[in-house]
Amino acid sequence: MLSPKRGNGFIFFLIIFQSALTVLLGFAVIFLDRYVYVDEKILDSYLIFVQDIFYFLVPVTIYFIFTKSRPGDVIPHNRLSAKNILFILALTLFFSPIVSAISSITALFAPTDVNNDILDILSTTPFIVSVISMAIMPAIFEELVFRGILLSNYKNTGLIKAAFASALFFGLIHGNVYQMIYAIAAGVFFAVLVAYTNSIFASVLSHFLFNGVQVVMTEIALNFSEAADMINNTPTLQENLTMIVMDIFLTVITLPFLILIFRKFTEYNKHNALDYRYSIKEKPLNALSINIEDGENKITDVYFVLSVIVSLMIIAVSFLI
């Protein structure tokens, strides 16, 4: 049976599992570096290629084995119509400036070292491997966790609570403040796509577009400039402020289009949204709208609180080192 308690228990297990795996991988890297000659950049490329399998697919598999649930009963999997695919492409395009603006503003007060780490890996990794490891695999495996298992267990609390709670953990799991904030915004967006289409494929497609475009643009930039300069260059305050102004301007220009397309998208998917909303309660599907807040299930419990605390501790430790 799906419930917030089960979702919170799963996310707590996921965080502990990933933390333990990170420690084990750290010892493995030290061992290989000390006793076996392995190029560090090549090793990083291999690790990032398989990390989502171990970090997300393994816990997801354990969840279904432990709960004896069928994936089809937990993961919303409606087929996307051609019109919905076009809606998702357009919504992702017009939502991107918002994510970019949040990212630029966050860069003013949060370390962006993760960008240099990603650039370093992309500069030494074949393009197809980068697309698979940084666009395709995260879009599939992360969505199975956060808009699949977690959102489904939360959805009976109301769309707003479910979307923000699942997005919160999606942000926290990134392990740093810079990615966390814009990931929360993106997570809410992905959750809404799933809720209105009753399909995990909606968020997978949008997630892939976000990551894929970044990989392609980075690859182009690396090919047209000195990779070392890009990796070692930290944007100045003036450059950050200029980027913020540009992102906010683009957001203002595209926001009316985002709102207009979203309204058309929700009207088109009204029946799918009702299917998703009432699939747990087994209510009739002839309601005129979705009750986005009913408060029948409390979303916070001891596992929810512990998951947030442990995640914040991990972020604090990563910030200090």
Image (cartoon, helix red, strand yellow):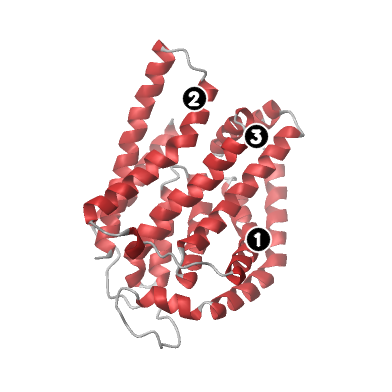
Relative placement, left or right, of 132 versus 272 is right
Quadrant where the C terminus sits is top left
Q: Amino acid at mark 3?
A: Thr
Q: Position of residue 190 (x, y in %)?
A: 50, 61
Residue drawn at (65%, 63%) of the image: 94
What is the CA distance from the residue labelled 1 to the residue labelled 2? 34 Å
**Neighbour tally class for label 3: few under 14, some 14-19, many 20 plus, Cα within 10 Å:** some
Quadrant where the N terminus sits is bottom left
What is the CA distance from the residue labelled 3 to the residue labelled 2? 25 Å
**Disc nearer the start of the sequence (1/2):** 2
Relative placement, left or right, of 15 versus 255 is left
What is the CA distance from the residue labelled 3 to the residue labelled 1? 27 Å
* Residue corresponding to mark 1: 93
Residue drawn at (49%, 24%) of the image: 43
- Using the image, determine if residue 45 lies above or below residue 182: above
* Residue corresponding to mark 2: 43
* Residue corresponding to mark 3: 234
Q: Callout 3: helix, strand or loop?
A: loop
Direction right: furthest residue: 224
- Using the image, determine if residue 311 lies above or below residue 150: above
Q: Position of residue 140 (x, y in %)?
A: 47, 51
Quadrant of the rendered image containing residue 120: top right
**Neighbour tally class for label 1: few under 14, some 14-19, many 20 plus, Cα within 10 Å:** some
Res. 128 in view:
yes
Q: Amino acid at mark 2?
A: Leu
